[in-house]
Image (cartoon, helix red, strand yellow):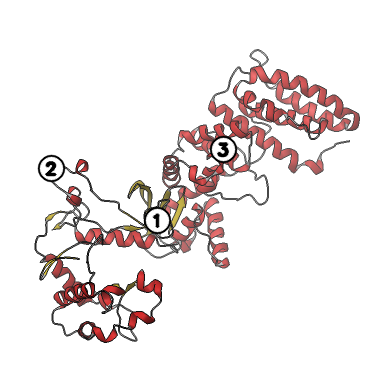
């Protein structure tokens, strides 16, 4: 509230400059006498004007405090400095949990006061569709402990602060009329969801995602767990959520998640100067969310490279693999929003997912579990490819076969020339995936030299490797030979064939005949 004149107040939930008191709760220099007399007087006048006379014991106690507030003028000296400077002070009666400003009579009198304020502009609220007083300046969204990657301490979803964004002679937030009640409700709820210790938010790059349900249950905890949110310190809860996720992947619905028709909401926000942009807004049900999460993780499922690799990788872990330098700050907000929509609504993954994965692999020649899982998920969902979790020697796809063949050639070099400075993957991987017709004749010729070396010490193992090459090459159409080029989808299959063949080498190493 900001003072206009004696007995008149103009509504504002944002304190920018000058004196502006809040109702029944505020900082110490407003609540306690002696620090800033003018601010305290504003706080007292507003409370007295709103409450008037009352029979409520709690509200009368509050009015008595204001009447004798000078008695407590030394109170701030004994208070923690952080509380004095930054925290708000609220009141409650000894022995009661609820605050005085939460009492029904205080709420009703505040609503009546707002409704009868002079100079108010009414309009149809865009949220409630009701005729109501319109708020000219919306409350801020607090950026505590970097809820958003921004230097701004406060941000706004709705604000108009220069002429170019105003139209039809309407200034401030009258351009997007939202009632006082609705504006207070959405900002209060959002600040609660974005609180530093909130379990209902996940941050990825410059995008912060918040989510909630309409009824109690553990659905929001499971969603946070699967999306890479802050891990719980409660070990039993962590095990329980992990068990839920495993059940979901197997197609089972955990009863602890509540009713399947419970509404489920997801909101993605990113900073833009002093404002917040809505990246995505998704409305679903707990049942659909669970079913779609299961479909997503089943599409990702592939043999892990190491035991420590996450069985159910989060979107953050996956998209970080596509970011330059694997820096989460470089994750594309657009790609994140598209992927979240794909997961939650069981839609095709964005096309850029495959192209980004192929680009990163070409750049650093690294094919790991997470990148292979991403490519598999894309091909399974978007191209309806049937893919096994482990090596499939019956798969006749040309890309998959060539990927396996490259892995065998690389294995031959590792056996024949241990610790080579320039490996076949370093020199030929990018060209093999893009132009196999030019590259494979060269690397297969080199492989024959490697096999000759292996035969001297491990003849049985050399025979095994040579037979694997013959089985793959023999399945390639002799008339057409190696294809001149591969499409992006075939390059994805190439990488999966390569990854699974490599995994097969290492998982069966103890059972191979090497002598």
Q: Is residue 207 visible?
A: yes
Q: Crowding at label 3, few (<14), some or many (≥20) Cα neighbours within 10 Å?
A: many
Gap in angstroms between the C-alphas marked 3 and 1? 28 Å
Question: Percent x, y for residue 410?
Answer: 73, 30
Give the quarter of the figure containing the C terminus. Answer: top right
Viewer-proximal residue among 214 and 59: 59
Q: Position of residue 346 (x, y in %)?
A: 44, 43
Q: Quadrant of residue 215?
A: bottom left
Residue at the image point whose x is 18% and y is 71% from the top:
110
Question: Which residue position is annotated with label 1?
Answer: 211
Residue 309 appears left or right of 19: right
Q: Which residue is mark 3?
A: 376
**Quick check: marks 3 and 1 in contact, CB under 8 Å?**
no
Tell me how far mark 1 sits from mark 2, CA to CA.
36 Å
Q: Earlier in the sequence, mark 3 or mark 1?
A: 1
Image coordinates for residue 85, horizontal then vertical, percent: 35, 70
Residue bearing mark 2: 168
Residue that appears at 64% across and 36% down: 366
Task: Find numbered disc 1 in the image and state the secondary structure of the residue it sits on.
Answer: strand
Whether label 1 touches label 2, CB < 8 Å = no
Residue plotted at (88% across, 28% down): 455
- Marks 2/3: CA–CA distance: 52 Å
């Amino acid at each position: 509230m900001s003072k206009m004149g004696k007995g008149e107040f103009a509504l504002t939930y944002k304190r920018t400059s000058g004196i502006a008191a809040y109702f029944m709760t505020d900082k110490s220099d407003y609540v306690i006498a002696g620090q800033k007399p003018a601010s305290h007087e504003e706080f007292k006048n507003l409370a007295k004007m709103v409450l008037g006379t009352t029979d409520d014991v709690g509200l009368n106690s509050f009015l008595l405090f204001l009447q004798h507030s000078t008695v407590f003028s030394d109170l701030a000296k004994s208070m923690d400095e952080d509380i004095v400077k930054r925290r708000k002070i609220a009141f409650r009666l000894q022995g009661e949990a609820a605050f005085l400003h939460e009492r029904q009579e205080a709420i009703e009198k505040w609503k009546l006061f707002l409704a009868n304020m002079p100079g108010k502009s009414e309009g149809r609220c865009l949220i409630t569709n009701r005729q109501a007083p319109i708020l000219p300046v919306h409350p801020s969204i607090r950026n505590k402990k970097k809820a958003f990657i921004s230097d701004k301490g406060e941000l706004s979803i709705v604000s108009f602060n220069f002429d170019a964004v105003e139209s039809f002679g309407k200034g401030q937030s009258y351009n997007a009329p939202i009632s006082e009640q609705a504006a207070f409700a959405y900002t209060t709820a959002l600040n609660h969801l974005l609180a530093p210790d909130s379990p209902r938010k996940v941050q990825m790059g410059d995008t912060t995602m918040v989510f909630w349900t309409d009824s109690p249950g553990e659905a929001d905890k499971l969603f946070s767990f699967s999306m890479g949110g802050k891990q719980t310190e409660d070990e039993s809860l962590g095990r329980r959520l992990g068990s839920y996720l495993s059940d979901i992947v197997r197609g089972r619905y955990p009863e602890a998640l509540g009713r399947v028709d419970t509404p489920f909401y997801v909101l993605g926000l990113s900073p833009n100067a002093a404002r917040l942009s809505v990246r995505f807004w998704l409305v679903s049900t707990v049942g659909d969310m669970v079913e779609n999460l299961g479909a997503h993780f089943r599409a990702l499922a592939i043999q892990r490279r190491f035991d420590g690799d996450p069985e159910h990788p989060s979107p953050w872990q996956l998209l970080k693999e596509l970011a330059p330098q694997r820096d989460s700050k470089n994750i594309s907000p657009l790609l994140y929003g598209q992927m979240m929509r794909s997961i939650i609504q069981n839609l095709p993954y964005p096309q850029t997912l495959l192209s980004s994965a192929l680009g990163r692999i070409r750049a650093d020649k690294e094919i790991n579990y997470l990148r292979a899982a991403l490519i598999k998920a894309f091909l399974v969902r978007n191209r309806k490819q049937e893919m096994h979790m482990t090596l499939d020697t019956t798969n006749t796809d040309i890309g998959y076969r060539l990927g396996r063949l490259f892995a065998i050639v690389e294995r031959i070099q590792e056996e024949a020339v241990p610790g080579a400075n320039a490996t076949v993957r370093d020199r030929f991987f990018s060209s093999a995936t893009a132009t196999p017709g030019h590259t494979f004749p060269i690397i297969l010729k080199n492989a024959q030299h490697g096999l000759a070396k292996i035969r001297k010490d491990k003849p049985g193992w050399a025979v095994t490797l040579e037979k694997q090459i013959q089985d793959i090459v023999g399945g390639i159409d002799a008339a057409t030979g190696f294809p001149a080029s591969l499409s992006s989808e075939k390059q994805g299959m190439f990488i999966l064939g390569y990854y699974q063949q490599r995994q097969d080498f290492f998982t069966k190493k103890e059972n191979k005949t090497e002598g």
